Image: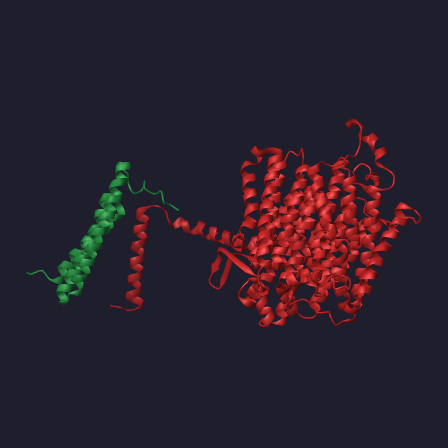
Amino acid sequence: MTPTTTWYLVLAAVLFGIGAVGLMVRRNPLVMFMCIELMLNAVNLSFVAFARAFTDIDGQTAVFFVMVVAAAEVVVGLGIIVSILRNRPGATVDDLSELRG
Amino acid sequence: MLDVLWLIPAFPLLGFVLILLFGRRLGEPRSGYLAAAAVLGSFVVTVGVFFDLLSMDDHHRSHVVTLFEWVPVSSLQIDMALLADPLSITMALFVTGIGFLIHLFAVGYMHGDPKFSKFFLYLNLFVLSMLMLVLGENLLVTFLGWEGVGACSYFLISFWHTRDSAATAGKKAFVTNRIGDWGVMLAMFLGFQAVGSVSYSALNSAAESGVIASSTATGITLLLFVGAMGKSAQFPLYLWLPDAMEGPTPVSALIHAATMVTAGVFLMTRMNPMLAAAAEWAPQIIAWVGAVTALFAATIAIAQTDIKKVLAYSTVSQLGYMFLAIGSGAFVAAIFHMVTHAFFKALMFLGSGSVIHGMHHEQDMRRMGALRTVMPITAGTFIIGWLAIAGVPPFAGFWSKDEILLFTLANSPVLYAIGLVTAILTAYYMTRQVIMVFFGEARWESHAEEEGAHGEFKPHESPAIMVFPLVVLAMLSVVGGIIQLPSFGIIPKGLRHRLEDWLHPVVAPGEAVISGTAAYDAKVWLAGLAILCALAGVVLAVLVYAKRRIKPLEPQLLAEGWRYDAAVSAFMGGPGRRVFAAVAWFDATVVDGAVNGAAGLVRGTSGVVRRVQTGNMRNYAGIVGVGVVLMLTWFVIVRGVL
């Protein structure tokens, strides 16, 4: 039994769902950050799967862009999160609401 | 010396800065001498420039020194440029010359004043502003000086600002002048719009060549005249000038003789090609306003009891003469009268200052009398000033007034009649003043008892530093007429019309030509008539005030200046104030309401909308999720992508 495109898509949906639910329920900023990465990579997986299925290079190109953006986002986001946690150890995202309107 | 033209305003500027920095340390006499020396410095430079110009050819007597680019904004190019030509140098000569004498006088007059150095600070700033005004090469530089003299007059009139009347008088002068400034500004805008420049050469050559439309020229002329009315105290804006007597007397002399009030006459003369290009009736309006002012102020002057008020109304009246001349196209005569008037009016103001000084700050003429015995030099010089202003030959005032009347008759016989009546009144009220102050019985004797606390009250002659300017000005008032003698048979050819030849390049476009008229042919008879009028005024006043053959006629109405001042106050205080209150209400409710309403709307909306920013991360994530779902629904169901 060889894996078909559907398998990959199901896996991507499951990973995305884990990421989305994790983002909604967890309060640790670092874990939430990882959830976002998970969702991004779930989407990447579905892009690659579609690219293989339709033998179209465009899907893989999009993945490169997503990875570049994700890398940049990690640099900035991790920097912010590390400096926040250094100032306020153990802070959850619920504590970080200074910009509330 | 032409290239160091900038030194003329630089000297008073230097004096101003030095006194500003070190005034207190320099102390009483020295800061005064420093200020006087600064003005003397610019006088010397002006004389140098004058002789330079004199040695030049008639057509080349115009030299522009550009100091720097002032306003370089695309098509609006304005330079900080000074212009030396016969007109500006004539003005600068008497501004600095008489200014210097007034500075000297003030050193004596302000003796013991606690704000001594500050007074000279303002005086130097005043002279600086006036020099910028006359030397400016474009309307904006002139306007800079124009505003400068306005501000300085405010400082100086309310110099003794702890006195309520002085503070009010200063404010009045400032506000009234602002009305005039409005006219000058609009004229400037109009000139720039029509010609694309505010420099005198551009505006005047446009007016001469007819590039500028007649209606525009009329507008510029009349707006400039509004400015001149404010600055040169013409009806109906004259009312600041009599109140300006609240300032120290040297200030009155400076404002009334050498600077400030002459600015309007100067500006009209500077723009004379514009007047020539304007519609026929525009100069006639100027002539009529001048004539009405001359007569109106003269009638008020005959009933005043304050020694300085008489002189103030007389100044208004004489300025009316100058505008009468300008409206009749007699620019040379206007400048001539301005110069001679500067001599004798400065003399008389300083003389009255000397009297006030000697009388221990008494200004009421009813308490003077017989002062010639105790103040012989002041009395002698004042009498010369009186003869000059009354129009008795061969004193300076006779020649200039005669010239104005000659041109006026060529313009309109009615205006000429008004001028003659004014001449009679002028001789009358000046004689009245001289008799009340210097002759008759000494009415200050009874006054002495009130001053008992100070010991014996005795008027005294002023110190040498105050008497010296009086003597110099008296000599100028005697011989001042020599600069522009008429072409009467007995006068040598070389002495005739000197000022006219000198000013010719500047005033040629606007100057009226009267050589063929009946008035010109009868000029000797007219001079005789003017002398008769002057003598009639003098004799009448002698009969009334010295011989007491006729009861003096000084109706209360005239003493109150035809109640014009009171009427303006009542109007401005009553209906005027209500209009201002209504405007203020409109501003506070409608204009401010619109602005505040817009701001309130934004504030209220944002107050509601900002609640969305909860600061709760999951909230945002949920909104993003919902948004994605909604977008998917849109694409799938409505657009049918799948």
Name the residue located 80 percent from the left edge and 36 percent from the top edge.
B374
Quarter holding the C terminus of chain B is: bottom left
Instruction: Report the residue that reaches farthest toward the left.
Output: A1
Chain that is coloured green in the picture? A
B110 vs B221: above or below: above
Q: Where is residue B142? Give x, y as percent.
A: 58, 56
Frontmost residue, B496 versus B580? B496
Instruction: Report the residue that reaches farthest toward the right.
Output: B549
Q: How many marks?
A: 0
Q: Where is residue B51? Give x, y as percent.
A: 59, 55
Colouring chosen for the image of the structure: by chain
Frontmost residue, B619 versus B143? B143
Frontmost residue, B283 versus B33? B33
Residue A81 visible from this viewpoint: yes
Frontmost residue, B506 versus B174? B506
Q: Colour of chain B?
A: red
Q: Toward which corner of the image does residue B141 lie, by quadrant?
A: bottom right
B249 vs B262: above or below: above
Q: Where is residue B398? Give x, y as percent.
A: 77, 56
